Amino acid sequence: MKLKNSILPAMLLFGAAALSSCEKHERENVAPAFEQGKISHVLADSAEVRSYNFAGSQISQINHYNTKSGELETYEKYSRDNKGKVVKISTFQGNSNTLLTEQQFVYDTKGDLSQTNTAYYAGGTLEYTSFAKFNYADHKLKSKSVYEGTDKDSTSSRLKSYFEYEVLPDGNYSQEKQFVIDGTGTPKLYSTTTYSYDSNTNPFHSFAEPGTISSPNNVISNATLVHSTNKTYTYNYTYKYDDHGNAISMATKGAKGKNETLTFRYGS
């Protein structure tokens, strides 16, 4: 079983879940403890999608819910070093607390993320591993390479894909290019995504997972060109804000006209 973290609206977090509980007391065991002003819940059409736990100003857990049953499906627990940097994120199944994935984060001497090592489990047994390497400039992510295999320091592990990023002077990521490696080992440009932003604060930016291209402002559109088909898929996002400038809802219009509205709640 390969598990991928579901990504909080791409327009907000980029690049970046789900939890389930059969008993009410299990839901209470992961009840959020929020700092004032921090986002606490995300709802889709009035159904809870995600909630957040904080320890002071730092995120400690993300909970993901089944929108139909309301049950906790998965949750991610964050571990940090004595400097507050995330060193491990463990994902568990909500109804059994079974470990699903464990991702470890390694940093360079400048404090930038250099590598992540991820282990995937099925029924408590290690099934698959992968790792990724990162390059930063001025503490902004410039590229990411994703590998398949366990030999993290050897070229024998297979490079699967890599990403290149462009950053605007205000810190927002303006473009992402994805390259995939074909059967001959040749990289080919698969897609190019461009982003546009408003001037309001992205409520998820301050606690984005290391290695994701989180931007400080809210994305209002992204357009992905798939080079093999020469087709472009565009998504537009419209926000409503409270009197303090906090985003309280976001309406999404997808490439095929499908609409979705997310509602954001904040802790008191």
Image (cartoon, helix red, strand yellow):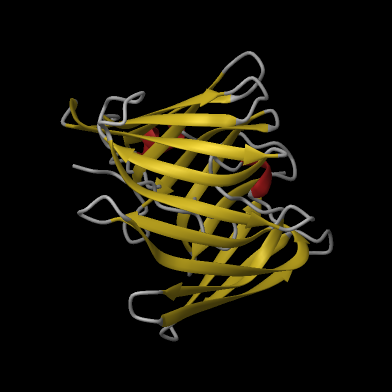
In the image: residue 259, left or right of residue 96? right
Q: Residue shown at 23%/43% (left/top)?
A: 2
Q: Residue 111 at what x, y percent from top left? A: 65, 25
145 and 257: which one is in front?
A: 145
The residue depicted at 46 percent of the width and 56 percent of the height is: 48
Residue found at the very far right of the displayed protein: 243
Residue 114 in the image: x percent, y percent?
A: 53, 30
Residue 261 lies, with reference to residue 15, above or below; the image says: below
Residue 240 picture quarter: bottom right
Q: Quadrant of the C terminus?
A: top right
- Residue 247 position, x and y percent, is 70, 62
The quarter in which the N terminus is drawn is: top left
The number of discs equals 0
Residue toward you, 213 or 38 = 213
User: Which residue, as the protein is rendered here, is positioned at the far bottom?
Assistant: 257
Query: What residue is rendered at 58% in x and 16% in y?
Result: 81
Residue 163: x and y, percent?
A: 47, 52
Q: Is residue 249 visible?
A: yes
Instruction: Choose between 235 and 147: the one closer to the eye.
Output: 147
Q: Is residue 13 visible?
A: no
* Depicted 164 relative to depicted 100: above or below: below
Residue 165 picture quarter? bottom right
Name the residue rendered at 77%, 62% in the picture.
200
